[in-house]
Amino acid sequence: MLAQCHDKRNKAEYEGMLDVSPQLLKELTSITSELLSLVDKLGGVQD
């Protein structure tokens, strides 16, 4: 799913083709929130 979004971003930037559905944005937002939550659980980086 993340690879699909990255591909669409590349096409928009390099080929001028912007084709993003509301459903794709909803899924991206959901998975991003989930990843953020998992990363937060890892804790901070210690020096």
Image: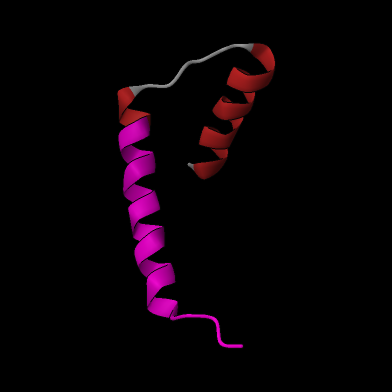
Is 23 located above or below residue 41 in the figure?
above
Horizontal relation, residue 14 to residue 23: left or right: right
Q: Quadrant of the C terminus?
A: bottom right
**4 relative to 36, above or below:** above
The answer to which image quadrant residue 14 occupies is top right
**x%, y% of residue 42?**
44, 79
How many callouts does the rendering have? 0
Q: Residue furthest bottom?
A: 47
Q: How is the image coloured?
A: secondary structure
Query: In the rendered structure, does residue 34 fall within the stretch colored magenta?
Result: yes
32 versus 47 height, above or below: above
Name the residue: 63% across, 27% down: 10
43 or 9, which lies in front? 43
The location of residue 27, given as percent across then percent down, is: 34, 40
Q: Of helix, strand and loop, which mostly describes the magenta segment?
A: helix
Magenta residue span: 25-47
**Residue 44's x, y, as percent?**
48, 80
Residue 36 lies in what quarter of the image?
A: bottom left
Q: Is residue 29 left or right of residue 12?
A: left
**Residue at the far top in the pictured view:** 16
> Which quadrant of the figure has residue 28?
top left
Horizontal relation, residue 44 to residue 33: left or right: right
Q: Is residue 13 magenta?
A: no
The residue positioned 55% from the left and 26% from the top of the image is 8
Asked whether 43 or 22 is in front, the reply is 43
